[in-house]
Image: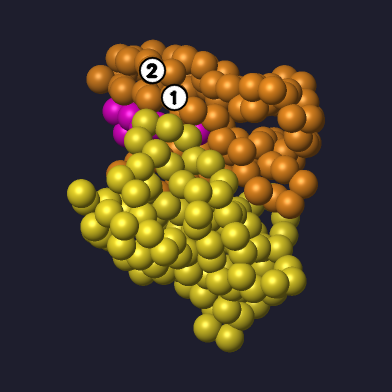
Amino acid sequence: NAGVTQTPKFQVLKTGQSMTLQCAQDMNHNSMYWYRQDPGMGLRLIYYSASEGTTDKGEVPNGYNVSRLNKREFSLRLESAAPSQTSVYFCASTGAYNEQFFGPGTRLTVL
Amino acid sequence: AQSVTQLDSQVPVFEEAPVELRCNYSSSVSVYLFWYVQYPNQGLQLLLKYLSGSTLVKGINGFEAEFNKSQTSFHLRKPSVHISDTAEYFCALYTGGFKTIFGAGTRLFVKA
């Protein structure tokens, strides 16, 4: 049981480049989430997917898109990266009591 | 509106001393409350949760928390900390729907 996995672990982009962060969970959870974590800002919700086939905006969706590919996978895309998107990105899924299971994170630097 | 406030951004403590990390919440409806721990360069992991029933909740690694409805608090405690407890701790609130509200985090620094 791998839990929540994320790829890549690290990424460096130049301003304007695009990339997709991948996330998968093997716990058969319906809901999945993307957060960003910045120093002093705590965790901020970017997008979430309540179930397969649905996605909704969180607090800070601008500059991002998501795809819920199937029940297991939820990807986050940056179409044109900006330095303000330098952050640590976490994917999570939700258990039976709304406890969240987090992946190990992707550390993204945009130059 | 619901909110979570972690009252201390940093807590330094000596090894084997007790520690309390404070969390207050605001909600007009019933709540689920959680504490998560984040070790350096890792994701968050669940320490413990309060859903209902007994107000004293025990978690992993010797941590416990007490739900106090009248004071709207959910403070995390450990009677004797270890160096390995050095991490960031997040209090979180769920009141329904699909969103969890996280506090800003408290950095626990355990000194030898």
Callout 1 secondary element: strand
Task: Report which residue position mark 2 lands on.
Answer: A10
- Percent across and percent down for residue B102 are 50, 55
Name the tint of chain A in the rendering.
orange
Name the tint of chain B in the rendering.
yellow
Chain under callout 2: A
Establish if B40 lies above or below A45: above
Residue B102: tell me if it is visible: no
Establish if A70 lies above or below B61: above
Which segment is the magenta one? A83-90
- Percent across and percent down for residue A94 are 69, 42
- Percent across and percent down for residue B86 are 33, 46
Q: Nearer the viewer, residue A40 or A84?
A: A40
Chain under callout 1: A
Crowd rating for badge 1 (residues with CA inside 10 Å; few <14, some 14–19, many 20+):
many
At label 1, the amino acid type is Thr
Which residue sits at x=64%, y=73%?
A: B55
In the image, residue B6 lies in the stretch drawn in magenta = no
At label 2, the amino acid type is Phe
Establish if B75 lies above or below A45: below
